[in-house]
Amino acid sequence: MTKKIVLAISGSLRKPSFTEKMLDLCIEGMGEDIEVKKFYPHKMKIEPCNSCWSCWGKKNPGVCARKDDFQEILDVYKQADYFLLAAPLYIFSFPATVKNVIDRFFILLEPAQVKSSRGYSEHPKRFGSHPKTVLISSCGFPEVENFYLLRQYFRKISDEMGWTWSGEIVISASGVANAPKLFDRKYELIKKAGAELVEGRISKETTDEIAKPVMSSEDYRKMATASFSGGMIDKIKTVSIAMKAIMEANKNS
């Protein structure tokens, strides 16, 4: 049996990366019958699209004038069954290195304009690839509403690039990941999301469960503020808030 190919973009510039942990848990949940090709845009030489339209020309249609590492991603994309794009929320959107990659997918589009099945104008797509696509993201603010623009943006990109949107995995208040046990249930749910993806798409119920807060926004704001102060009293405050959340979680489980 031929293994399904997973194109995975790990877009966090941090190491260790909580967002990459989310990505790896999803991949783990997808099981053994996959071959994963993971890329780190911030470690690659990927220049921005300069809108030269060379790939739309008659001389070299579908060939980018930029000769850099994006070609490695494009080669995998042409074979990919799944496209997992993992990136933390940077000023309510993608990090610049990830946005570079997205812009370079301009090469998927042909110059003609046609009416889409949604009733809007669109470009025909090249290469015949329509991978199942998932957004994976985390943010430092506690409210899940902070993902609103990113979610809408990614859905629009998926529609316009001909990707098969298949769900999303988002976690706010990612600073809680440093506290033991609080995110254990989320980690199991992310693996469940990966299993659901292989069966079709990630369910809204699983997405919503993953996104549920583990403490109040007020407690999280206090904890996040204290953790950046660095003093002994603030460290004690951070631990006490985390312990309170852990006890409440145990009480409700």
Image (cartoon, rainbow, N blue to C red):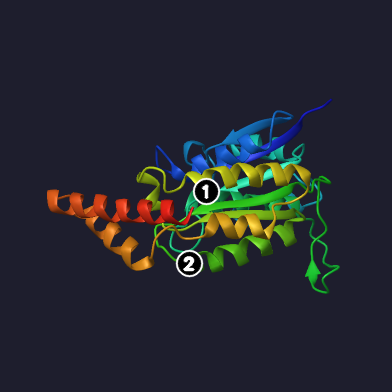
Farthest residue in the top direction? 1
Please name the amino acid that badge 1 sits on. Answer: Lys
Relative side of 173 to 203, left or right? left
Residue in the picture at 77% in, 29% down: 3
**What residue sits right under mark 2 in the picture?**
146
- At label 2, which amino acid type do we have? Asn
Question: Tag 1, which secondary structure?
Answer: helix
Q: Quick one: which residue is furthest to the left in this view?
A: 232
Q: Position of residue 241 (x, y in %)?
A: 28, 56
Looking at marks 2 and 1 on the same chain, the residue that comes earlier in the sequence is marked by 2
Could one spot residue 10 in this view of the protein? no
Residue 200 position, x and y percent, is: 78, 48
Determine the residue positioned at 45% across, 47% down.
Answer: 183
Query: Is residue 166 in view from this perspective?
Result: yes
The image position of residue 236, as x and y in percent, is 19, 50
Q: Mark 2 or mark 1: which is in front?
A: 1
Residue 130 relative to residue 39: left or right: right
* Residue named by callout 1: 186
Q: Secondary structure at mark 2?
A: helix
The mark total stands at 2
The disc placed on residue 112 is: none
Q: Position of residue 121 (x, y in %)?
A: 80, 71
**Within-10-Å neighbours for mark 1: few <14, some 14–19, many 20+:** many
Which residue sits at x=69%, y=40%? Answer: 74
Estimate how packed mark 2 is, as few (under 14), some (14 to 19) or many (20 or more) residues with alpha carbons within 10 Å.
Answer: some
